[in-house]
Image: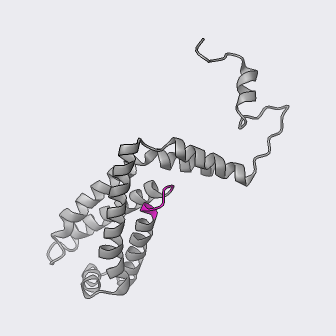
Amino acid sequence: MSGRTDDPMKQIRDDPMRQTGNETAVITPTARVTAARLAIRAARPRRLTSTLLWAAQILLAALFVFVAAVPKLTGSHQSVQEFADIGAGQWLRYFVGTAELAGAIGLLTPWLAGLAAAGLAADMAGATIINATVLHHTTFGPNVWLTAVLCAVFALLAYARRQQVQGLAAAIRR
């Protein structure tokens, strides 16, 4: 016997999240959190893949904190000059620095890692477009290749963490 049952009542009794017209289920916030944790845990990749992903995420988070976000937020001369060349104002420097810092923190948070990687991929896509179009005649123009590679790396990280993102989305919908 394969363990599969065709008895619909047994299937309903075995699944506590299913609800019929005769039964009333009470779903508490604790049950939702537990269900979300179980969904995220079920979506985890294999051990070696997970170890490699975490190593990449830690390195990229450190890179983004110390090389990207902190200089923008502290007003380093190079960052101020770069955003002055863009012409959108220094508010954009603070916004991008804050987004990059949030993304770096999100990369280190297990249930946010996929969303953070997707957000940083979008950030790097924007940086690539700005470097290729606005800053192409300045000293910042050659950064287009660096930002394009980082965009691809973050897109791959987001793709690798897609099941966690789906688990998080399912937990939010419940």
Q: Is residue 66 magenta?
A: no
Of residues 35 and 147, the one nearer the viewer is 35
Whether residue 174 is visible here, answered yes or no, is: no
Left or right: residue 140 compared with residue 75: left
Identity of the residue furthest to the right in this view: 22
Of residues 103 and 13, the one nearer the viewer is 13
Main SS type for the magenta part? loop
Residue at screen point 31% across, 74% down: 68
Query: How many labels were placed on the picture?
Result: 0
Residue at screen point 24% across, 84% down: 78
Whether residue 15 is visible here, answered yes or no, is: yes
User: Which coloring applies here?
Assistant: one colour
Residue at screen point 31% across, 61% down: 125
Residue at screen point 40% across, 44% down: 47
Quarter location, residue 94: bottom left
Quarter location, residue 86: bottom left
Left or right: residue 167 compared with residue 146: right
Looking at the image, is 138 positioned above or below residue 123?
A: below
Rendered location of residue 141, percent (x, y): 17, 72
Of residues 73 and 96, the one nearer the viewer is 73
Q: Quadrant of the N terminus?
A: top right
Rendered location of residue 17, percent (x, y): 71, 38
Looking at the image, is 12 positioned above or below residue 149?
A: above
Rendered location of residue 4, percent (x, y): 62, 18
Which stretch did the figure color magenta? 106-111
Rendered location of residue 5, percent (x, y): 66, 17
